[in-house]
Image (tube, helix red, strand yellow):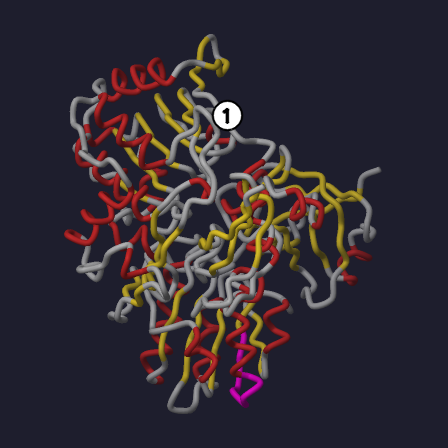
């Protein structure tokens, strides 16, 4: 019996935690600590601890699928590639969009960028492209801060980064938290500033009065607001005004790398562009995509895949080699722990095969070949090699924060029909948004939070006649969802919360649409 440890990176959030995968007879069977990491010191959150389980995820895809007679049918790789190349030639570059997962490796994303160049399109994006790009040195250094302002629920979205905030507080640092409810992050706070959807910028301005000291940080997690870039701009403004370091944490494990490589066309603009007729999606959940022709390459049969015209089976993080760049801009190695199942290919290899089928070979034989191209063409990555990254990775020097100011936050308008404000929130078991595609293929994480729920104050539960632990229907102007009620402390009357994830066949987006906040009513059902 063979037994070994393989170090790798967590595929969930952008903290960039390392851990070991336990490999027995060539198969990943468990996860274990990797104490040498400069980011997480051998610690992991629940998502990282159980990430290995997705290698056997129940929704994994092992064979290419092609739509025939309005249903997906198994086909050969040759048939799938022939269909893709034929259809791609029918569209102009301006009619094609390519969307990269920001949970994929730098090599995966760069290969897709090269495919975008072959197709002559600038519509190259990722879910990380929300107009926010800022890092300020190492995550570990946050533990030495004397004052920290946290915007968002960092304890649930980026738990090991929040641990550094706790370390700083233990040393005497003052901590202020801006959030929409008394979230777990507020337990770290010396001061809690409650924001409501639409007034996030005003709440952040109040936090400016709190910033003192020579080593202050403003940490921007995943905003509960829809106008995320504008909210981040307010956070950057108070940081610059007070001489504090500004740190933004992407939702995705390689969000920073995706932006560095160039998957930065605003994702909202790509989604809303009516000129897009063909869409190629690499490993990310976009829901049903309203394009004429949709290709999805993914490890799992996501909703995007279920509605696609061609689906290509891709490897999970434990089955590929490469690199990823975390929130602090540390480039680190991902090591392959097991071979992909028969018929499954790493994302980069799928893209290479498509380029060759189009008559435009990329010339890549290994992920290391792609990384050599990255280091030759991407600023900050010059001179790096796989060998140079093996110990602690490489921390790229901080550069000036870039935040693109978008639409202003809009206050949610309630009325008699929809009297409550609903906000999407993360959970420590499933993260935020598209990470749920990964977590719902980890049985232990699903066991902890198997269903979507709605959180409500005791006052509103009584007012609207709903009961803790009972089912209720949450209704908005775009849809409705039946979920379990949780009566929770710390939720202000007039507001409710719901996990930002998909579980089973239901998703919070069925009520919120593409919004993070909306007006709803709640009615108990039998």
Image location of residue 344, percent across then percent down: 43, 28
Front position in the image: 111 or 480: 111
**Residue 164 to residue 393: above or below:** below
State the count of labels: 1
In this view of the protein, which residue sits in the foreground, 146 or 81? 81
From the viewer's perspective, tell me whether residue 252 is left or right of residue 350: right
Q: Quadrant of the C terminus?
A: top right
Query: Residue 28: which quarter of the image?
Result: top right
Residue at (35, 13) in percent of width and height: 79
Q: Residues within 10 Å of mark 1 (few under 14, many from 20)?
A: some
Decide which of 437, 513 is in the foreground and name it.
Answer: 437
Asked which quadrant contains residue 387, the reply is bottom left
Between 337 and 304, which is closer to the camera in this rendering? 337
In magenta stretch: residue 173: yes
**7 lies above or below 492:** above
Residue picked out by circle 1: 306
- Does residue 60 show up? yes
Looking at the figure, which quarter contains the N terminus? top right
Residue 269 x %, y % = 32, 43
The magenta-colored residue range is 169-177
Residue lying farthest to the front in this orientation: 1
Residue 436 seen in the figure: no
In reply to whether residue 260 is colored magenta, the answer given is no
The x, y position of residue 499, in whole percent, is 61, 51
Could you say whether the residue bearing mark 1 is in a helix, strand or loop? helix
């Amino acid at each position: 019996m063979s037994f070994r440890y393989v170090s790798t990176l967590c595929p969930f959030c952008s903290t960039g935690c390392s851990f070991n995968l336990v490999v027995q007879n060539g198969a990943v069977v468990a996860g274990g600590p990797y104490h040498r990491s400069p980011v997480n010191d051998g610690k992991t959150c629940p998502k990282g601890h159980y990430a290995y389980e997705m290698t056997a995820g129940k929704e994994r895809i092992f064979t290419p699928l092609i739509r025939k007679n309005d249903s997906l049918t198994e086909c050969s790789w040759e048939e799938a590639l022939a269909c893709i190349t034929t259809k791609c030639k029918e569209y102009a570059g301006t009619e094609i969009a390519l969307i990269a997962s920001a949970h994929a490796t730098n090599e995966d994303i760069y290969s897709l960028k090269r495919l975008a160049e072959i197709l002559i399109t600038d519509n190259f994006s990722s879910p990380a492209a929300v107009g926010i790009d800022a890092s300020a040195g190492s995550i570990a250094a946050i533990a030495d801060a004397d004052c920290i302002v946290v915007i968002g629920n960092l304890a649930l979205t980026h738990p090991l980064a929040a641990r550094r905030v706790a370390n700083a507080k233990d040393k005497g640092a003052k901590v202020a938290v801006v959030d929409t409810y008394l979230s777990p992050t507020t337990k770290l706070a010396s001061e809690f500033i409650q924001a409501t959807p639409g007034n996030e910028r005003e709440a952040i301005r109040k936090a400016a009065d709190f910033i003192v000291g020579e080593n202050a940080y403003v940490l921007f997690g995943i905003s509960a607001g829809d106008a995320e870039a504008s909210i981040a701009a307010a956070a950057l403004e108070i940081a610059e005004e007070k001489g504090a370091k500004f740190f933004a944490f992407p939702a995705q494990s390689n969000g920073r790398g995706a932006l560095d490589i160039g998957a930065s066309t605003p994702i909202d603009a790509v989604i809303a562009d009516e000129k897009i007729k063909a869409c190629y999606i690499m490993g990310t959940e976009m829901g049903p995509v309203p394009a004429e022709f949709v290709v999805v390459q993914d490890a799992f049969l996501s909703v995007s895949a279920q509605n696609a015209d061609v689906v290509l089976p891709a490897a999970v993080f434990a089955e590929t080699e490469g690199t990823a760049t975390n929130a602090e801009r540390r480039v680190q190695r991902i090591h392959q722990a097991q071979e992909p199942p028969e018929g499954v290919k790493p994302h980069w290899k799928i893209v290479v095969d498509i380029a060759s089928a189009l008559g435009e070979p990329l010339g890549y034989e290994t992920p290391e070949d792609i990384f050599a191209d990255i280091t030759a063409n991407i600023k900050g990555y010059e001179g790096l090699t796989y060998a140079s990254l093996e110990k602690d990775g490489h921390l790229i020097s901080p550069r000036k924060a870039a935040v693109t100011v978008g639409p202003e936050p809009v206050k949610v308008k309630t009325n008699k029909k929809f009297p409550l404000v609903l906000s999407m929130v993360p959970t420590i078991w499933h993260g935020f948004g598209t990470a749920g595609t990964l977590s719902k293929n980890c049985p232990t994480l699903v066991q902890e939070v198997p269903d979507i729920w709605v959180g409500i104050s005791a006052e509103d539960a009584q007012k609207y006649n709903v009961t803790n632990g009972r089912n209720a229907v949450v209704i908005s102007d775009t849809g409705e969802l039946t979920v379990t009620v949780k009566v929770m402390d710390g939720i202000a009357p007039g507001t409710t919360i719901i996990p930002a994830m998909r579980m089973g066949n239901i998703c919070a987006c069925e009520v919120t649409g593409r919004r993070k906040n909306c007006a709803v009513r709640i009615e108990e059902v039998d």
